Each structure stands twice: as C-alpha cells, then as structure tokens.
Image (cartoon, rainbow, N blue to C red):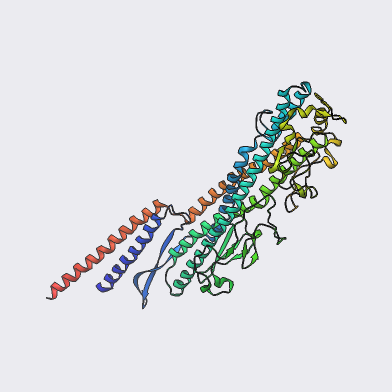
Amino acid sequence: MNLLASLSIATGSLSVIEAQYAVTANNVANANTTGYVKETAATLSSVAAGYGTGVRLGNTQLAINQALQSSLYQQNAQASSYTVMSDSLAAVSSVQGSTSQDSGSTSSLSDQLGNLQSALISLTSTPTQSVSQSAVVSKASALVTTVQTLASTYASQRQAAADGAVSDVSSINSDLTQIGALSKQIMKFKSLGQGTADLENQRLGVMSDLSSNLSVSFTTSANGDMTVRTADGTQLPTRPDQMGLDDSTQTLPSSTWPLSTSSVTLSSSSYYSAQNTNSSIPAITLAGQDITTSLTGGSLGGNLTLRDSTYPQMQAQLDSFSYTVMNRFSSAGLPLFVTGSDANATSSIQGSDLSKPVPQGIVGLSASLSVNSTYTKTPSALTTTTNSDGSTNTGVTTTISNVLSTTFGSDAEDVSGGLSAPSSNLGPGGSISTGYAGNQGLLALSTALTSNQGATIASMGAGVTSSSAVLTLLQTKVADVSGVNVNDEMAKTVALQNAYTANAKIISTVQTMFNALLSAIQ
C-alpha cells in the first residue's frame, strides 16, 4: 500500500469519525427528549479491486424494537386515559362526602337524609315549636343543596370532558398530519438513498405525543411510509393519498383533518349514540363515517367515557334518587320536595318533564329539585291540617309519623311497585342502569349511590397507579434498547477521540514522509 492510499484512508476515516461525533452529540443533546430513539452511525468497509480502501459512512440507524415501542404507546394511552378520568372525578369526590364518616358529619346524601329524619323525629315530640318546624325545612334545604351541588358538578365536569374531546381531536389531527408530512420527506430521501434517521426520530416523537391522546399502533413500509391504526384496527390517514385522494386537497399539518367533530353545549338530555343519528352530541367522523366508538384510550378515550358513560350514569342515579325522595314523601302525604318549576305545587310529582312516563320524564330532575314553598314560607304547615269547614288543627303529627314509618321505611310495601326507585332504562337515551336495586329504603339508596360512585372514582385512581407502574416498567425496557445512555455516549466520545488522534497521526506521518521524499529527490 503506497503513501497516497494511506493518506486517503486516514483522511476518509477522519470524515467518518466527524460524522460519528455529530451523531453522538445529537444523542447526548436529546437524552431527555420524550420519544427520542438513540441513533447509530453505520460504518462500512470500503473495498476496491479486492483491496481495502478504508471505511465509509452508511445511513444512520435507529436503535428501535418496534414491538416494544408499540407496547409503550399503548400503555401510554391507557395511563393517559386513567389520568384524565381520575382528575375529572376528583371534583365529584370533593363534594360527594363519604359513607365511612360518622353519621351526620358530612354533606353526603345519606348524612343529609339522616339529618332530615332526625329533625322529623324531633318534630313529633315538639310539633308546635317553630324551632322544630324550621329545623325540618332547614334540613330539607340542606339535602336539596347537596343534590343540586352534585348535579351541577356532574354537568360541569361532563361539559369539560366534551370540550376536552373536541380539543383532543384537534391535537390528534395535528399529530397525524405532521406524521404524514414527515413520512413524505422520509420517502423522498429514501428514494434518493439518503439517510432519514433524524426525520424518523422526529416522527416517533410525534407518535409518542399522539399516543397520549389516543390508543394507536403503527407499521412502517419499506419505502419509509407509516400507517397508523386505532386499537380496533381502524386506519387513520396521515395524508390524503392514504385515502386515495390527491395530497393537494390538504395543507399539512392540519388541525381540522382527517377527523371531524364540533363543539356542543350539553344539557341533561344530551347524549351520543352510534345507533341513533338523531342523538344530540355530534359524532367524530372520518370521511363522513362515524368512528367515535373506535377512538379509545388516551385523553380522548377518557373524555369520551366521561361524557358518554360515567357522568350520564351518575346523573341518572341522582335523578332516580331525587325522584324517589319526592315520590315517597308525597305518597306519605307530605309533598315536601318539588321541582323548581313547580315550587308551589300541592303534589310534588310535577315539573321537570314528568308528563312523560318514568323513567324518561325524570332526566335532569335533580338540578331543579327544591323544597316546597308552602313549607319554606310557613313551616308550621308541616303539623297543620285543614278541616272540611276551613278550620285548622295545629300540632298534628299524623302525617309526620307516617313519613317516618313509610317514607323512611324498608318494608316491601314501602319500597316496591310505584315506590321503587327507577333502576333501568334511565338517561336521555333510555339505556342507563343505576347498578343497584331500587327496592331499598331511602337511606340505603343514598348509601348505594354514594358507594357506587365512590367505587367508580376509586377504580380510576387505582387505574392510574397500576397503569403508571406498567408504563414506567416499559419505559425502562425501551430505554435499555432505544434510550440514550450518556455514560455510554461519553465512552464512545473517548474512543472517537483516540481514533481521530491516531488517524491524524497517520496523516502527519505521511506528510513527514512525503516531505522527506521530496527533500531526497531535490
């Protein structure tokens, strides 16, 4: 091998080492970048006419295990979904009270109902005392306040979930189309034989962000394109050409394509149904087709679950309870509770939309529940009866005693038939069940409601804990394969420095030998 060949090999090696330095520096710089995958500068032996001519630089490669990466994205979506739901339900937990506290010590439904029962018992002992009469009205008002606070919390959190879903769709569109734009560049450079590692890394970072919004998986083709699918296999296009359309029809990235939906102000009667095109909540569509039920996991999946399942069931449970309180008090002869639209009613089973059969007519009833103004204006009416001649009797406890024995009773005749709490076919779509029996006493019903909702809240918290633990484990495994170990990169730097010094020494030595040769022939 002559001096020129040695000089060429050493010079080429320096170029390769400089490129490896750049890759190492990029790895270190992105060591804490979410979704970044370690890059490796490939080196290839260079041979000409059977003789080694040094080393040449190949395309930079990503250290990735696609199956492991997909598992990470799926787990990221699950953890994100649980977090969204748990954070939202914390607002309910803060106003709901607990069935495990001392009786009467919290603002829970069972405590407020128990306080009302105690006030009624006291009234039977002192039926003519205004303090006892006002105490009943006060405790009834406190129960109504708790019911209305819960109803308002469900409504506001459900609206927040609906708004969050619309925002999530916009973010998902941006991520999908950014992936599409990057894939287009990757395919172009691959076709020219150029490296695409940096672009692919950027695309994986977008995929990581997308997985926090939605449960997705991906596959890559030989030409560098990426296909994204939902958990049930529905393909989400990243560019128009993946749908057979011309790419010029959309400017990428876009927050309004390919998924489409719209904002809506919810009411207690609002609901979404894939089977009912007349449902009042807009679907999420792809090319005009409803794919809402295919969009699970991530913040979007969590928000859709809250909007369409969790809060509607909680509202239905509360509406059933409120209706049952009204119904049983009225049936005992004391119409203490009415709906807000009928506060002067002599019968409590009016207002809301109770012209419809139960349970259809009780949707949203809780928000308008109130204490009958007959008693708020004149508390003594609780123990006053009117004779046929118009004269009145005061201090009468017959009705109050009947309320205590039947309204708060748990015998079959007190809790069955028309007095049973509606437990199925609830909600605006008529498809919701409370999850517990309706033929229970009022105190048992209130406890069942609070316990059922408390279990839902607790399960979301447990879901956050377990899914986050699995996510951390997967992140560790992915980091072992794809993550940047700064110590390893620093060790590479030392090795590259030594190699650079050695090749520079070769070049210096060759130059010295050339100079000696030139001096000898002059």
- The quadrant of the picture occupied by the N terminus is bottom left
The residue located at (25%, 65%) in the rendering is 506
Q: Nearer the viewer, residue 79 or 443?
A: 443
Q: Residue furthest right?
A: 388
In the drawing, does residue 228 fall left or right of residue 30?
A: right
Residue 437 in picture, x, y percent from top left: 78, 42
Residue 382 occupies which quadrant of the picture? top right
Residue 34 in picture, x, y percent from top left: 47, 54
Question: Is residue 483 among the parts visible in the rendering?
Answer: yes
Residue 402 occupies which quadrant of the picture? top right
Instruction: Say if 178 sits above or below 155 in the image.
Output: below
Residue 237 in picture, x, y percent from top left: 57, 67
Q: Nearer the viewer, residue 280 or 452?
A: 280
Q: Residue furthest left?
A: 522
Q: Nearer the viewer, residue 510 or 254?
A: 254
In the drawing, does residue 519 fall left or right of residue 256?
A: left
- The quadrant of the picture occupied by the C terminus is bottom left
Numbered circles on residues, count = 0
Instruction: Say if 95 sits above or below 357 in the image.
Output: above
Q: Nearer the viewer, residue 394 or 145?
A: 394
The residue located at (54%, 51%) in the rendering is 474
Question: Is residue 72 among the parts visible in the rendering?
Answer: no
In the drawing, does residue 229 fall left or right of residue 248?
A: right
Residue 156 in picture, x, y percent from top left: 61, 46
